[in-house]
Image (cartoon, coloured by chain):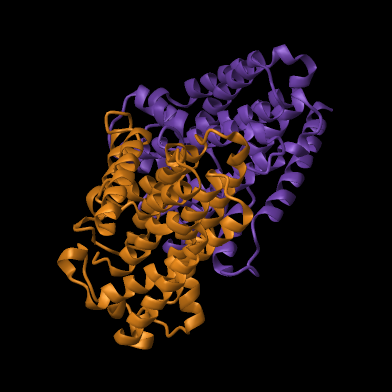
Chain colours: A orange, B purple
């Protein structure tokens, strides 16, 4: 019953997000068509919309009219997609496939892929400005910029690249995870709460949840690279080991990693107890993230 | 006398801009140091700071306290530098030198160069949020995003890349110039005026000036590639012809191009007559742009 409920809500969020993204990003009939085609190719490649869903769900715990946060939710998906496009480039992780489809640079060439990422990052800031309470826009843009910039996503990717083919310790590994995946997940939840006008204490609870969720996400990602199914994943598995990347299974082994994952999800959910029944969706979402197969 | 005055004012603006940029972008002691080193390498490579100077000078025509617009002025320089870093990449224009120094990817490698550009673009939006009147931030961010995104800078670069080694007509050439260089120059002037609370009619005059200035900038850039001095330019000349790029000298010849440039500067200056004496600096700046040798 809870499971069915969860899926219905998730689908509803996702449909609204896709509709808004479709509205925000011009289609290929808008000149120059190729750049919009490339942006939309990656943006509508079948992503889970996890970050915008987190944003809307967090908003929904405080207030009902979550449509108002859609523009901010979509800005998070634009930032996420831009980072995937740039991470996949030959000079970065050099990935040919993502979600079972050729990566943006494989389909459109490197130059257009770099520019499509740039344009999505730029579009994210404009989308976030659509939030109707203009007194909040400063805080929203700052949160987005901090999570995406050199102290966030970019910082994580820098350290990930520098640590390839090197033995790194657990603190370096944690830095990479926290910044490459964690910060955007954290800001997704926080921005939903900020848009809804959450109080300081509530915002702290949301942040606590989101930090553990980000960690769970990365641990399960590492696990999938070892025990996942290449077909369901839509990309090559075993890449991390091949690149000699530091991962949880490599450091702790598969069994202990699974236990760490379970307790991380428990910790995430505990932060939501202060919201009583209203926390159910985000709790379920944490399990969903830990147990996903792609 | 006017000339000396102009230089003193320009230097003052530039010093304030450099100081603010130094404050805004972390140095290499901030983890991860390499990304900040790369960002600062390109940001402090001896640029003319034309765009932020335009922003401050436009502000200064309306109001005296131009320090208030410094954060927005610096965001324009961050966007300009990001676009240079990405344009120089091997998959784009593949330039080894800029301002007499190795380009960012030559110095730090492609991955770090892509990320340094990304981080500068991201930092630009945060810097602009520092503007003290928060009711203006929505308009400022939208102007920045529009001039940088697929309808601005990125759109121009896309068409520039797609037109390489192809014969293109004058309207395609104008699209590239207007978007690759023109839009950011236009927004630089407009944002200065917007920050100073310019009235609609004033903003139109500023926009008229800036559009002609952007055109003059590109025409003189084309000329420099034909008749410039490689040493003063700090980069290879004759690149446009080698790449078979459409340029004004290629379409009209050098002499006619010089005449077009002169009349474009005249048109730019005429827009400033409504500001009487106060327009002197921006008028002088238009001549400076047309007659620069690098």
- Residue A158 shows up from this direction: no
Check the image and name the residue furthest to the left: A231
Figure quadrant of the C terminus of chain A:
bottom left
Closer-to-camera residue (A138/B141):
A138
Q: How many marks?
A: 0
Check the image and name the residue furthest to the right: B1
Closer-to-camera residue (B158/B173):
B158
Closer-to-camera residue (A267/A247):
A267
User: Residue B248: x percent and y percent?
Assistant: 43, 27
Q: Is residue A24 above or below residue B20?
A: above
In the picture, measured across the screen, residue A268 lies left or right of residue B190, that is left
Task: Name the residue at 44% across, 50% down.
Answer: A55
Q: Is residue B222 above or below residue A78?
A: above
User: Residue B10: x percent and y percent?
Assistant: 75, 37
In the picture, measured across the screen, residue B124 lies left or right of residue B174, that is right
Figure quadrant of the N terminus of chain A:
bottom left
Task: Name the residue at 42% across, 62% down.
Answer: B110
User: Residue B176: x percent and y percent?
Assistant: 41, 31
- Residue A9 shows up from this direction: yes
User: Residue B37: x percent and y percent?
Assistant: 59, 64
Q: Is residue B293 above or below residue A190?
A: above
User: Image quadrant of residue A227?
Assistant: bottom left
Closer-to-camera residue (A228/B205):
A228
Task: Name the residue at 47% across, 68% down.
Answer: A270
In the picture, measured across the screen, residue A194 lies left or right of residue B68, that is left
Q: Is residue A230 above or below residue A40?
A: below
């Amino acid at each position: 019953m809870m499971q069915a409920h969860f899926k219905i809500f998730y689908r509803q969020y996702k449909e609204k997000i896709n509709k808004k993204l479709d509205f925000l990003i011009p289609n290929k009939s808008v000149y120059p068509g190729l750049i919009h085609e490339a942006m939309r190719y990656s943006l509508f490649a079948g992503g889970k919309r996890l970050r915008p869903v987190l944003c809307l769900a967090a908003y929904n715990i405080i207030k009902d009219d979550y449509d108002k946060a859609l523009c901010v939710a979509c800005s998070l998906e634009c930032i996420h997609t831009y980072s995937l496009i740039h991470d996949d480039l030959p000079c970065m992780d050099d990935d040919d496939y993502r979600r079972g489809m050729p990566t943006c640079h494989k389909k459109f060439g490197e130059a257009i892929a770099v520019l499509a990422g740039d344009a999505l990052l730029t579009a994210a800031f404009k989308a976030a400005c659509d939030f109707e309470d203009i007194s909040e826009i400063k805080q929203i843009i700052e949160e987005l910029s901090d999570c995406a910039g050199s102290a966030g996503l970019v910082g994580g990717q820098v350290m990930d690249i520098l640590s390839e083919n090197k033995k790194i310790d657990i603190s370096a590994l944690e830095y990479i995870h926290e910044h490459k995946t964690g910060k955007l997940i954290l800001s997704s939840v926080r921005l939903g709460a900020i848009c809804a006008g959450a109080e300081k204490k509530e915002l702290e609870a949301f942040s606590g949840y989101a930090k553990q969720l980000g960690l769970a996400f990365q641990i399960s990602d590492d696990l999938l690279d070892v025990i996942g199914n290449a077909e369901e994943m839509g990309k090559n598995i075993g890449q991390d080991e091949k690149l000699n990347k530091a991962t949880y299974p490599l450091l702790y082994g598969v069994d202990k990693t699974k236990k760490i994952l379970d307790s991380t999800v428990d910790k995430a959910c505990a932060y939501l107890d202060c919201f009583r029944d209203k926390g159910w969706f985000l709790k379920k979402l944490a399990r969903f993230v830990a147990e996903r197969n792609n």
